[in-house]
Amino acid sequence: MTIGFIGLGHMGEPMASNLLKAGYKVHVYDVAPEAVKTLVKKGAIAASSIAEMAEECDVIITSVQTGQQVKEICLSQDGIFSHAKPDLLYIDCSSIDVITASTLHAEAKNLRIAMLDAPVSGGVSGAQAGTLTFMVGGGDIDFARAGPFFQAMGKKIVHAGPGSHGQAAKICNNLLLGISMIGVCEAFTLAEKLGLDKKTFFEISAHASGQCWAMTSYCPVPGILENVPANKHYEPGFMAKMMLKDLRLGQHAADMVNASIPLGSLTAELYELYVNSGYGEKDFSGIINFIASKEHN
Amino acid sequence: MTIGFIGLGHMGEPMASNLLKAGYKVHVYDVAPEAVKTLVKKGAIAASSIAEMAEECDVIITSVQTGQQVKEICLSQDGIFSHAKPDLLYIDCSSIDVITASTLHAEAKNLRIAMLDAPVSGGVSGAQAGTLTFMVGGGDIDFARAGPFFQAMGKKIVHAGPGSHGQAAKICNNLLLGISMIGVCEAFTLAEKLGLDKKTFFEISAHASGQCWAMTSYCPVPGILENVPANKHYEPGFMAKMMLKDLRLGQHAADMVNASIPLGSLTAELYELYVNSGYGEKDFSGIINFIASKEHN
Amino acid sequence: MTIGFIGLGHMGEPMASNLLKAGYKVHVYDVAPEAVKTLVKKGAIAASSIAEMAEECDVIITSVQTGQQVKEICLSQDGIFSHAKPDLLYIDCSSIDVITASTLHAEAKNLRIAMLDAPVSGGVSGAQAGTLTFMVGGGDIDFARAGPFFQAMGKKIVHAGPGSHGQAAKICNNLLLGISMIGVCEAFTLAEKLGLDKKTFFEISAHASGQCWAMTSYCPVPGILENVPANKHYEPGFMAKMMLKDLRLGQHAADMVNASIPLGSLTAELYELYVNSGYGEKDFSGIINFIASKEHN
Amino acid sequence: MTIGFIGLGHMGEPMASNLLKAGYKVHVYDVAPEAVKTLVKKGAIAASSIAEMAEECDVIITSVQTGQQVKEICLSQDGIFSHAKPDLLYIDCSSIDVITASTLHAEAKNLRIAMLDAPVSGGVSGAQAGTLTFMVGGGDIDFARAGPFFQAMGKKIVHAGPGSHGQAAKICNNLLLGISMIGVCEAFTLAEKLGLDKKTFFEISAHASGQCWAMTSYCPVPGILENVPANKHYEPGFMAKMMLKDLRLGQHAADMVNASIPLGSLTAELYELYVNSGYGEKDFSGIINFIASKEHN
């Protein structure tokens, strides 16, 4: 059994490495030759093209930036779908829009290719540690078949529903995460300006109705939780520009299905202002400095 | 030792009752004679005026609607402060604005009256069950002295800091609660329109970075958690109009200290629209029907 | 010289009629046979297919709903671009996203087809009266060549810049229109609740710094201006669902170029709530009833 | 006939000067002795106290910062109302909240003192040039009586309605102005990022449905209109912090009368962020730099 892996960036590189560590035979492809070399040193085989990879691999995993890229990798003349082996299992681990994911699932179904959309959360550190969460959309049988590969790269694998529901679940969860994070930033900023001690307020709200993961597991205020970006000058973690990307996907999805997301849209616009101010590569919790009109420390 | 209790509404009535149950001698006062009668039947003594109560009680507790009311009860010619016994402990359990709370603390200090601001959370059911949370602002000694009375009426008592910090803590917590609640409503509405199963999405997000109390302890979607207003036609619980009141207090506090709370303000405006549509006495989680443009069930 | 017209809906039908009135020979095409018949009665020639039309017409105008539709009409195997005469001038009068407009301009340039994007404002009544405004993107020569056709259908023709700038200008203008309209609704709702006489407030603000077209030419409050939708039970005019469409195009454009439009996004979400409440086919000024929590009259 | 003037700041000083120029006898009072001296040099008489002024003047005008200050000036033991001559006409030109204005009108009525609330617009330059606009609340007879004094200080005098309606009208107008201004900033920022020429877009939108005073009389983009703050490094004009003050008054008024102002509240929060970033004394049109994430030029 051979696995092909396309897209060896910050996320893809450690994910492919973990597949190698788990003993799988892995073919790799990336537009950047350096990225390929790194994996080859760890035991991977360099594919000369996507078409060649498709002709040789039983499972192909993609991890790239945009829906447009996934579309080209899958649907172009030299792409995966035109050159797939009869029994291919195709897994897209990119975070992309629901429409593109649905389009690809439909096309895969036409061609009788098994497909899963499986966006991840957990960031670069989760990819390295093999502790990612996968939110997976697709059929039961395909989901079961993919289990071992997900296990090699992550810790928690959830089946969100049929095709494209992995993307949908991630978008909805991150919409809520973005809103909660700015909510926490506003509450702590107001609390500080009202003279409340930050630790006291944390103790109160963490055990009251304001509790949320963004506060109790990822507090944006320095000096409260250990090992969170707030205590490391907001080094990511989960970059603000990636949160912005997910929130924009939320707006597109909401437009598509006629949903109103007033707080979600405002959250996107605030992240846009934050990213445009030059902080896109800071952790997304760094937006507390924007809300409080403070310089980054 | 005698306790005076002013304000026998939905909250005050069960709170005073719990003091009686705990064995305290309680004098009561309210502008509504019916409310007084109910308490007298349970063993309370009707005070003929606030001044008379002040002259006889060692501890006085107020539980009313607005800062203006508290001000009048305390500062008018016939009010508490002009008629207080030398060792009075005055506890205001109303939810009011920080400026009024600070003004009253300053005046109390001038007159050497011990004062605590102690707004509660937990709603009518918490008041009845004696499980309220008190967020308390004031000095250490006064906080210690008030312990037994809070214990008789509640379960969790937190010392938020000096005078007015009880109000500040409650406002900041409820600001975050309001934001989280609408965030949850948006996420579930979008999820449903994208075809996700509500229970599946709950399972995913409850264990992921979108988790928050508003979802996992008070889910606004029917059919997920037992014993929440969503399963009782949104009977409160915590009324939407009370959430709106707290969010407006948040805006006032933010104005006072020059804090920006964009999501908090938008949340207040959405609750205003919801309340103005005739749903002010529904539970605050009922706003999911407004976000989803659904009729209340 | 022969003109082809594709898309004979509420807007396209009167636009094509006005070309006939101006003496042009017009071939028409629509998926709905009824729409074609109506135009044929007025002197148009029914084209049997888009390809046939392309082979016979010197100028082709499209007026459809979505960017996806324009794409298919232009780029499919049987579409305009594959069958165009050497000197074709192609004019798209649909309101679509900037990316699709840019893609089509690029493709047209490759094939040496002259193209203009020329979205309109003025609504159905403007289309019927021949008083539309055209915001046009494309080259100077093509703009000049198209002048007579625009004159036959509209009153004001502005050259917004090179390809896709017609769409860009319309999106930005309507973003501002949507924001102004809700601003006017909020100001008049607050004014009314504060007891101000609506006509007095109109007189004051119409001559002060709050003045805007949405107030002084299209006032959403009944009883102030004649001949506006507010005085006709909010019959359109410009439907709320069309305003929502333009605002969503604004969000997409902002996402594409990394612009932050906080008020624009919130305006879109408020229109989404209004449309989802069942008022999508009311005039967009009817949102004053939503802001004021009033029933439509 | 003697006029008393209290509050000789940026606005009050030129207003009082214009009364002197018009030939009135003016008594002045301010907590800052320097401000008094300046006016005395111009022919004013220094009042030793507010009480003394009240005992001597037929008309008293106040121009101060906050409702709290006006309250003290009027209602304290040594204030205007306790020492007023029988026929006093009291005019408050400060911009304050509607509740305080109403309270003062009620108290004045009790004491049979004629009162007008008359907030101004036009800024420091308007005060100097004597071209202010007065929005006036109060009775018809008092409005008529005050005419000559307003004429001496301003150009446009509008009667908004009975007591407090001057404040109400100004708050509602400036709410709309703030919203329009940010709308213009968003539209031009998006237009620029989409590649539109700013002058071309101005020409289009200024004659289309996006037109508003904030664009066509006060354009926040440099290089379009002459003599606007955008061409003078955003020197005020109308300071951002004063716009923020008016928007916060709008939120308070909306809270008081249960109005929802979603765009208005968001506008206030964006101005709060702008002011907190250190630009409170820039012109309010400078917020375009915040929206566009640009440095001030």
Image (cartoon, coloured by chain):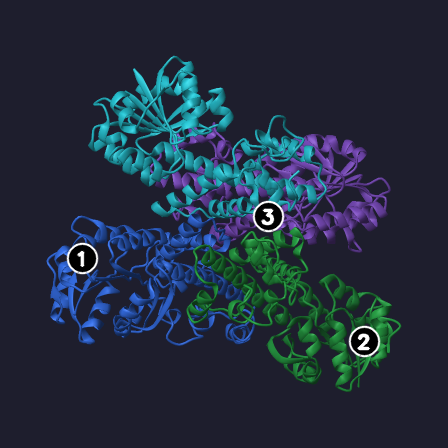
Chain colours: A green, B blue, C purple, D cyan
- Residue B84, numbered label: 1
- Chain under disc 1: B
Report whether D32 appears left or right of D214. left
Tell me whether marks 3 and 1 sit on the same chain: no
Q: Amino acid at mark 1?
A: Ala
Is residue A55 at least partly visible in the picture? no
Q: Position of residue B266 (x, y in %)?
A: 47, 53
Residue located at (29% from left, 23% from top): D142
Mark 3 and mark 1: Cα distance apart in space: 56 Å
Asked which quadrant contains residue A155, the reply is bottom right
Q: Nearer the viewer, residue D86 or C225?
A: D86
Q: Residue furthest right?
A: A48
Mark 1 neighbour density, 10 Å: few (under 14) some (14–19) many (20 or more): many
The secondary element bearing badge 2 is classed as loop
- Chain under disc 3: C
Is residue B252 at least partly visible in the picture? yes
Q: Nearer the viewer, residue A182 or B3?
A: B3
Residue that carries the numbered disc 2 in the rendered image: A84
| Residue A92 versus residue B286 in the image, above or below | below
Mark 1 and mark 2: Cα distance apart in space: 87 Å
Q: Indicate the quadrant containing the C terminus of chain A: top left, top right, bottom left or bottom right.
A: bottom right
Q: Position of residue C195 (x, y in %)?
A: 33, 37
Residue located at (59% from left, 43% from top): C175
The secondary element bearing badge 1 is classed as loop
Q: Are marks 3 and 1 in contact (CB under 8 Å)?
A: no
Asked which quadrant contains residue D81, the reply is top left
The secondary element bearing badge 3 is classed as loop
Q: Amino acid at mark 2?
A: Ala
Mark 2 neighbour density, 10 Å: few (under 14) some (14–19) many (20 or more): many
- Residue C261, numbered label: 3
